[in-house]
Amino acid sequence: MKTLRLTLLSFITAVSAYANVSNTEKEALVAIYNSTDGSAWNTPWDLETPVEKWAGVTIEDNHVTGLNLPFNNLNGSLPVAIGDLTHLKKLNLGFNGIQGVIPEALGRLTHLESLELFMNKFEGEIPQAIGHLKALKSLKLYSNKLTGQLPLALMTLTNLEELLLGSNFLTGAIPTEIKALKKLKRFSVMDNKMNGHIPVEIATLTDLEELLLSSNGFTGALPIEFINLSKLNTMMVSDNNLNQDYVSSSGNTPPVLMTIEPQNATATMDIEKE
């Protein structure tokens, strides 16, 4: 009898060691697996085993809170079912070959703090639905094939610390509404097809450390107010249509704004720090 009780206890302990993930969330993961050619992943899932044994899946309180699958040979497209992972906090699918549009269903992941879809083959416009992700701190969509203008909805994500959209085919101007992103530390739209003046409102982002605007069609001059960005240590604005050519800078101290004289290619101080 004692042996039977011990056996039952061991069984109950083994069962309780596994999370009781809902069928909805498990089916969403399976849909992602099937839509991105899971059998060809570098580290495929064994769908017959418990969800918590699947590589890259984080479970907390019986819910999927993390999906971390970079460098895993994901191909195909993201299914609408990804929106059923409503407890997700981190989604990293970088360095893969995912195609198609970024699904609007991502807007349902309102607990998401980090969305990393960089280095894929996503195309189309950045969905307005991303504006629903008010907890988002990091949005990395660089090195895809995204088109269209920056959605104003992105400018409502006031918890953003990183907004990295470089190496796409984005057009239009930087919205002046960017001034709402007071926590922003890194902002990049380099290597796109954007234009217009660089908005002076960026100078109000006093936590900004990295500003990458090079290789676009921006016009005018750098706002003199940028000199007040005391935490800025990396700034790249070359290869635009600005009134002057500015020296790109990177280091541990705030950069001075320098222009390059076209006649002798020597750097001259345009704005001096007080």
Image (tube, rainbow, N blue to C red):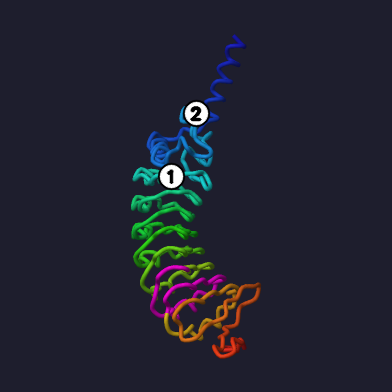
Judging by the rendered image, the residue that carries numbered circle 1 is 75
Residue for point 55% across, 71% down: 207
Give the quarter of the image for residue 272: bottom right
Region in magenta: 191-218
Q: Position of residue 49 (x, y in %)?
A: 50, 28
From where the camera sits, is residue 9 visible? yes
| The N terminus lies in quadrant | top right
Judging by the rendered image, the residue that carries numbered circle 2 is 49
Residue for point 50% across, 74% down: 205
Element carrying mark 1 = strand
Amino acid identity at mark 1: Asn
Element carrying mark 2 = loop
Residue for point 46% across, 82% down: 242
User: Label 2: few (<14), some or many (≥20) within 10 Å?
Assistant: few
Amino acid identity at mark 2: Thr
Give the quarter of the image for residue 210: bottom right
- In the image, residue 223 above or below residue 152: below
Q: Position of residue 257 (x, y in %)?
A: 57, 83
